[in-house]
Amino acid sequence: MPMPERPPLATVLVAVLAGAKLALHLVVNAVTPYGFHRDEFLYLAMGRHLQLWRMDFPPGIALLAEATRGVLGDSLLAIRTAPALAGVALVVLAALLARELGGGRWAQGLAAAAPLASPLFLRAANLFQPVVLDQLLWTAALYALARICRSGEQRWWVALGAAIGAGLLTKFSIGFLGVALLPAILLSSQRRALLTPWPWIGVTIALAIGSPSVVGQVRLGFPVLGQMADLRASQLDRVTPTAFVLGQFLWGPITLLALAGVAALLRAERFRVFRPVGWTCVGAFVVLLLLRGKPYYLGPVYPTLCAAGAVLLEGVRPRRLGTSLRWSTVALVVAFGIVTLPLGVPILPPSRMAAYAQAIGATPALRTNTGQMDQLPQDYADMLGWEEQVATVAEVYHALPPADRARAVIVGGNYGEAGAIDFFGPRLGLPAAVSPAGSYWFFGPGQKPGEVVVTIGPSREQLIPLFESVRAAARVVQPWAVEEERDLTVHVATNPRQTLQEIWPSLAGQN
């Protein structure tokens, strides 16, 4: 079969869309009425506690946190520049995929616009989390696979392996892509490549790049298994296959475009050479469906599928029908992007955001990870109240008698509370926090035995069995925060029944 034609890159159009993506995120993070997200505090703390070969979480995000702080500083805008740039790279890569699949200027433009017009990609590129890196690296891997399929150039197995390895260093979910990729290759003519050294070189590169994630799991006894069990019990147990499928339609018209892309990759003759790409995307869908993943877990395949859908629409004939379909699709994508922009980036203050979500009927966006309805999208509520919490803890800490203050340990009930103290606390004269929650448990209890403890998060009932004296010292209220952070008491506990070092092993696995 002759090699499919690869049109010129629509350089100016793609550059304009990429620039718009970058400008949007930089402007939003310069003026947003919200602050840091609880997860961002965790990843920044992981950077401060970086042990490349001994972390319970893939350390790529911790490496990026330290690099960002070292180069740009730790302002909100600085920290969120890296995910914004990753979002820009995703725009460019989507256009390159459309070109690789045979798409011209129009298809490349639509593929590049998809990450600009859906909360699925806007939210990810606006937060310092691994999600946007996951989207980018899946797309990079699928682009390398498309290059292999189109040209037969075996060196692209190296790029495929590097993308998967970087994904493994970033987020374990790249494994879903790997599981889907193998049968897609075995069931296609690409299986002949397995008789050459190139795929195995790619596998070696993937394992080498991702080795810190694997070694960390081995050394710590595979904590990812416990994390997955906790996630399944607290969040994924309510995600039925139906909810997973219907959840895909929350992303707007790009879902329909992606469905067109699936049909094109699996059925259209002009895409025959790219069948392994289509089957890999379908395989990832099946794996996540069976494992009851959250709807957004499938997000990394959308840039590829939208690129294929855009190329399919570009080739529709007769001309009049094709023109109508193409520009109707553009109108729908743009209109949805404009209407849902406040759901993708935090531009409206809490009261207006809550009213807007109700006004446009976006109630699914207000459902929390545990299935409850809230006032704001959970990501937005998780950006509120942290600095006030730390200021209140600082007031209590500095009000202690000097002797008690010298012995005091600050304990956060979850990684958001502890991470906020670690981030804002130094400028308020606070020592580093400890917490038994999640990754913070692996950071340890510190050196002080806990003769005096200032806590935020734990209730009096939780503290009484551990200390002889517990008193409420202050209260911090933020009505727009997530439910567990709306009304907190800062306690001072003294005379522990056991030292922190003695009790720490029994606290493993706390949420």
Image (spheres, rainbow, N blue to C red):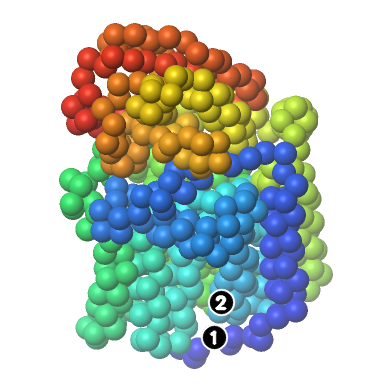
Task: Bin the neighbour count of mark 1 within 10 Å (Cα to Cα): few under 14, some 14-19, many 20 and up.
Answer: some
Residue 16 percent across, percent down from the top left: 75, 71
Q: Amino acid at mark 1?
A: Pro
Q: Earlier in the sequence, mark 2 or mark 1?
A: 1
Residue 397 percent across, percent down from the top left: 48, 24
Reading the image, the residue beneath label 1 is 4
Whether residue 241 can be seen here:
no
Distance CA(mark 2)–CA(mark 1): 8 Å
Mark sitting on residue 101: 2
Q: Residue furthest front?
A: 402
Between 380 and 431, the one lying in front of the other is 431
Residue 177, placed above or below residue 347: below
* SS at badge 2: loop
Residue drawn at x 54%, y 15% is: 474
Q: Residue furthest bottom?
A: 2
Quarter of the figure that contains the C terminus: top left
Residue 29, placed above or below residue 63: above
Query: Does residue 60 appear to the left or right of 326 in the view shown?
Result: left
Between 319 and 443, the one lying in front of the other is 443
Asked if labels 1 and 2 touch by Cβ distance under 8 angstroms, the answer is: yes
Between 196 and 45, the one lying in front of the other is 45
Q: Amino acid at mark 2?
A: Leu
Residue drawn at x 45%, y 87% is: 151
Residue drawn at x 79%, y 68% is: 323
Query: Does residue 267 appear to the left or right of 349 in the view shown?
Result: left
Residue drawn at x 23%, y 51% is: 217
* SS at badge 1: loop
Residue 198 percent across, percent down from the top left: 29, 83
Residue 384, placed above or below residue 190: above
In this rendering, the count of numbered labels is 2
Query: Does residue 154 appear to the left or right of 257 in the view shown?
Result: left
Mark sitting on residue 214: none
